[in-house]
Amino acid sequence: MNAENPEVLISEEEIQARVLALAEQISADYGGEELVMVGVLKGSFIFLADLSRRLSIPRTIEFIAVSSYDNGSVASGAVRLVMDVRGNIEGKHVLIVEDIVDTGHTLKYLIRLMKSHRPASVKTAALVRKAESAEVDVTIDYLGFDIGDEWVVGYGLDYAEQNRTLPYIGFVEPTDS
Ligand code: 5GP
C-alpha cells in the first residue's frame, strides 16, 4: 500500500451521485426552512462544500473543531472541543456535517454540545460510517456510505494530514497500529 496513491474504495462519481441524492433529500425534508450547516473540521470540509452547494433551501455555514485522535490513526479516547460555533444557533435548525462516524463518541458529543445552544432541531449527516466499530448508539439522519474498518483518506479525510484533496475515498494501511 502506498500512501501517495491510495487504492480506490469509493469513486469520485459514486460520491458525487450520493452527495446529490442526500442534498435532494435534505432540501425536501426541511421544506424551505433555513438550515445552519455545522461542519466538523477538518475532515468534513469538502463534503460540506459539495453538499451545501447542492441544496435548494436557504442555508448558512458554521464550523466546529474537535480533536479525538492524535496525528495518525490511533484513538486517544476523549473528545476535546477545539472551536465552538461562532454564530448564534439558538432557535435554528442545525445539521451537523461529519466526515466519519467510527465509534460514534465524537458525534454523540457534538449532538449534546449543539443541543446546549438551544437550537430548534439537531440532525446529523455523515459521509461514511464504520458500522462494525460502533460503540455508542447515535442516529445518522443522512448517511453517505457504510464501510468496513479500514483507514480511509481523500475527499477531506487525511492520514497524518496527507491525502485530504483526493477526489475519491481511498484506503491506506496505517503504520502506527
Ligand atoms: P469516533 O468518535 O466516531 O470514533 O471518531 C470519529 C472521528 O475519527 C472522525 O471524525 C475522524 O476524524 C476520525 N476517523 C475515524 N476513522 C477514520 C478514518 O478511517 N480516516 C480518517 N481520516 N479519519 C477517521
Image: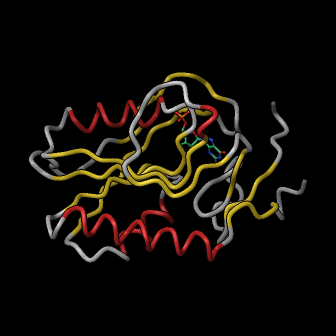
Report ligand 1 position as a quadrant: top right
Q: Is residue 31 above or below residue 87?
A: below
Based on the displayed image, in which of its 4 quarters is residue 36 positioned? bottom left
Q: Is residue 71 above or below residue 40?
A: above
Q: Is residue 106 above or below residue 120?
A: above
Give x and y (percent) for residue 125. Answer: 40, 52
Give x and y (percent) for residue 2. Answer: 89, 57
Based on the displayed image, in which of its 4 quarters is residue 77 positioned? top right
**156 left or right of 169?**
left
Give x and y (percent) for residue 84. Answer: 31, 41
Give x and y (percent) for residue 41. Answer: 46, 50
**172 left or right of 17?**
right
Identified at 18% across, 53% down, the residue is 93
**38 left or right of 176?**
left
Identified at 56% across, 45% down, the residue is 129
Identified at 60% across, 33% down, the residue is 69
Identified at 17% across, 38% down, the residue is 117
